[in-house]
Amino acid sequence: MKRFSEKFEKIMMAITFAESGEHETARDIMKKTESASAERPTVWKRPRDTRRQSPRR
């Protein structure tokens, strides 16, 4: 959840700069946000086996 709030905060900051006419600053903030998220590896979970196992006797 922390990553989401940090990313949201950076996006809102970029929007504020863009609205005030500082377009280059907003672009720089967004580039840093995108590069930071690209560095994190994606973790893929293996799908859970949905077949039922027959009880062993």
Image: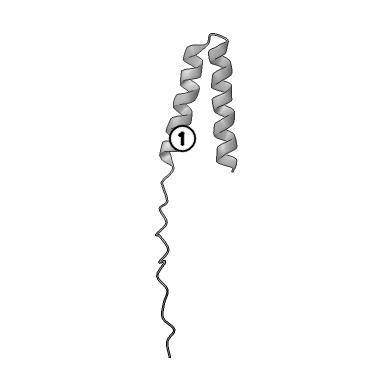
| Image quarter hosting the C terminus | bottom left
In the image, is 55 to the left or to the right of 7? left
Residue that appears at 60% across and 36% down = 5
Reading the image, the residue beneath label 1 is 36
| Image quarter hosting the N terminus | top right
Does residue 10 sit above or below 5 in this rendering? Answer: above
> What x and y, as percent, mark residue 34?
44, 31
Does residue 13 sit above or below 42 in this rendering? Answer: above
Residue that appears at 57% across and 31% down = 8
The three-letter code of the residue at mark 1 reads Ala
> What x and y, as percent, mark residue 38?
41, 37
Does residue 12 sit above or below 53 in this rendering? Answer: above
Does residue 18 sit above or below 1 in this rendering? Answer: above
> What x and y, as percent, mark residue 28?
47, 20
Q: Compare residues 31 and 51 and report the one nearer the observer.
A: 51
> What x and y, as percent, mark residue 32?
47, 28
In the image, is 22 to the left or to the right of 57? right
Q: Quadrant of residue 13?
A: top right
Q: Quadrant of residue 10?
A: top right
